[in-house]
Image: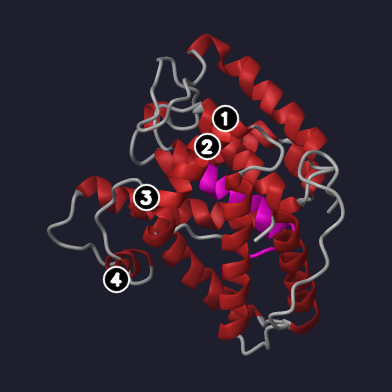
Amino acid sequence: MDLQVLLAEVDRNRNLLAERYHPTPEQIQNFDDYFRIRNTFTSNALEGNFLSLVDTRLVLKDGISVGGKRINDLLETLSHGKTFDLMLSIARNSTLDSIAKHFLLIICDLHHSFYEMIDKKNAGVYRDVDVMIGGASILPPAPDELDMFMDNFKAVFGRYKNTYHPVCLAAYAHLRFVQIHPFLDGNGRTSRLLMNLILVNQGYQIVDIDKDSGARYYDALEKADKQGYKENEFYSLIAELELKAQKEFMRINHIDYPGPDPPSPAPGHCNGMMMK
């Protein structure tokens, strides 16, 4: 589906949910627990964590240590669950302007929260060694270039927030973050948390990248390295996953989906003309 049509449809759904979905505090907590477990499972699984969805629930919801599992898998699960809560807190208690102003601090806080139980020394600290991204052709900047690249990342995000569609803005933040790869490890999970922070802040649903989408996800990231930051396949994928998440959320909450009729294309583009 064309990206502009996708964006128009997700906006229509967002507006519909804002009109019809009025949860109680108990419902909000219930869904937070649900998405914490699911998002932790899917994001960790992309990085080779062997805990199942049931294992993840036992660890995060019931506080049960799963026997026979790798210690690092358990630590990653606990850490991601905790950082998911931090992500929600920042998303719900910040304006987009505030997020842009404190962009690098938020990134370091997310990484520190996720990584401190795994490698406290390197948690929230830019790497001091060169790294390669497995399966990708792009070469991340050298350690002595990271401050410059991250400062530029913040500046560009600050410009894009006023012109990019929010879904494209979230996808851009994820994409540029993994290209820079500022930390020794944990970049993938931090980038997905950052993306969802922006989506939640702007009234959209949490995006999960499950095993069925994994191959396309990595392929779209690789292609986007060559396609640039206008319209690319990665933006389209995230828009599709957002639409999927919205439909699922409507189904769970018994909200009738608007129907199959395609919406009118949204004005502008993701290259600096798409207003939120």
Q: Is residue 198 magenta?
A: yes
In x, y percent, where is residue 4?
A: 75, 56
Of 35 and 33, which appears nearest the observer? 35
Occupied quadrant, residue 194:
top right
Of 132 and 230, which appears nearest the observer? 230
Q: Which residue is mark 4?
A: 54
Q: CA distance from mark 3 to mark 2?
A: 18 Å
In x, y percent, where is residue 78?
A: 37, 54
Query: In the rendered structure, which disc, 1 or 4, sits on the residue that comes first in sequence?
Result: 4
User: Label 2's element?
Assistant: helix
The magenta stretch is 191-206
- Amino acid at pointer 1: Lys
- Amino acid at pointer 2: Lys
User: Label 4's element?
Assistant: helix
Query: In the rendered structure, which disc, 4 or 2, sits on the residue that comes first in sequence?
Result: 4
Query: In the rendered structure, which disc, 3 or 1, sits on the residue that comes first in sequence?
Result: 3
Question: Badge 1, how many Cα within 10 Å: few under 14, some, many 20+?
Answer: few
Q: Which residue is mark 1?
A: 226
Between disc 1 and disc 4, the foreground one is 1
In x, y percent, where is residue 261?
A: 74, 79
